[in-house]
Amino acid sequence: MKSVKFENGDEMPILGLGTWKSKPGEVYDAVLHALKCGYRHIDCAPIYQNEKEVGKALQKAFKDGIVTREEIFVTSKLWNNAHKKDQVIPALEKTLKDLKLDYLDLYLIHWPVAQKEVNVSQPADFLSPKEVPLLETWEGMEEAFHEGLTLHIGVSNFNIKNLTEILDNCEVMPEMNQVELHPLLPQNDLIEFCHENGVQVTAYSPLGSTDRTAAMKKDDEPNLMENETIQSIAKKHNISPAQVLIAWAMERDTVVIPKSVNEGRIKENFESLKVELDQVDLEKIAKIKGPYRFVDGTFWTMEGSPYKLEDLWD
């Protein structure tokens, strides 16, 4: 499988299984199907509330000889309620316990947002950037790296400004930025900045995230899978729209983590590795009108919140 390479030579499979929105009771089989198919990269997070089940699936896969621990790449993330320096390692240890692993391959700060509890319902639930600076959180991430609890560390949902703050002041460089990426939100400038600074990029919601909760949706939002350009390219190559979108992400040297719990679609998504889009396809995709952000971050910017949308996005 194609991969991206970290500075120390470690490789991360360019295609992974996303587990956001995978319900308990479904994600166990999804992980096993994916590993049997050939996936060697699983993307997780404690806020997805399914890491224990992912862990059971991984143990089953190890026991049955489907894969060894060394053959797979597992990512998880630090949730917003554990941004103080002394909270980072306990949060990671909880994730490792749930996943039944001794170490992660990659650990990310999930959002550049700090809060007191797991969920927020009012402005008082947040901790401001002055109360918990990003650099304090990053120092905790560096400690986790030095203790061998994770082989690589990085960030998620970081814009150029927030990433620069880390890059200019860190001891251990962030090696990944996981962000929403698809033809309606190509984020060309952010990708260029990341790659110029030795930071790899992972694309989440690569298919448009139509299965997110109703509270996160807008009545008039576009459907990426039904986009005429994507449909026409799929027809041309006799592949699915999802395969077009996944192949497009990999063509840009970005890691991509489509989510599915359907055995057939998990296999179909994996077959995207064989898809080759030509220059005409890429030029057509580049002309798709955007930008449109499906995960817009407005849930962090309620009136009175210390966070504004301009703090999140470039």
Image (cartoon, rainbow, N blue to C red):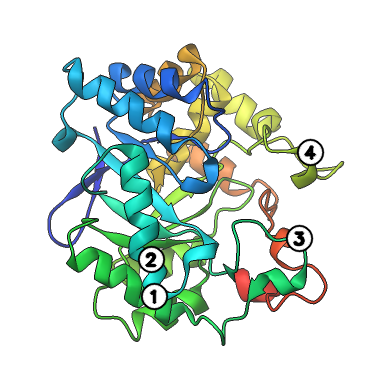
Q: Which residue is mark 1?
A: 85
Label 1 residue SS: helix
Q: Quadrant of the N terminus?
A: top left
* Residue position for label 4: 214
Q: Given contact means CB atoms under 8 Å apart, are the residues at marks 2 and 1 in contact? A: yes
The earlier-in-sequence mark between 4 and 2 is: 2
Which image quadrant for residue 312? bottom right
Q: Secondary structure at mark 2?
A: helix
Residue 277 seen in the current view? no
Secondary structure category for the residue under label 3 = loop
Q: Residue at x 38, y 65 (%)?
A: 88
The residue depicted at 80 percent of the width and 77 percent of the height is 304
Which residue bears the numbered disc 3? 121
Is label 1 in contact with label 4 (beta carbons under 8 Å)?
Answer: no
- Residue 204 visible, this angle: yes
Residue 150 percent across, percent down from the top left:
24, 56
Residue 130 screen position, x and y as percent: 57, 87
Quote the CA–CA distance across marks 2 and 3: 23 Å
For marks 2 and 1, give the CA distance.
6 Å
Q: Nearer the viewer, residue 10 or 20?
A: 20
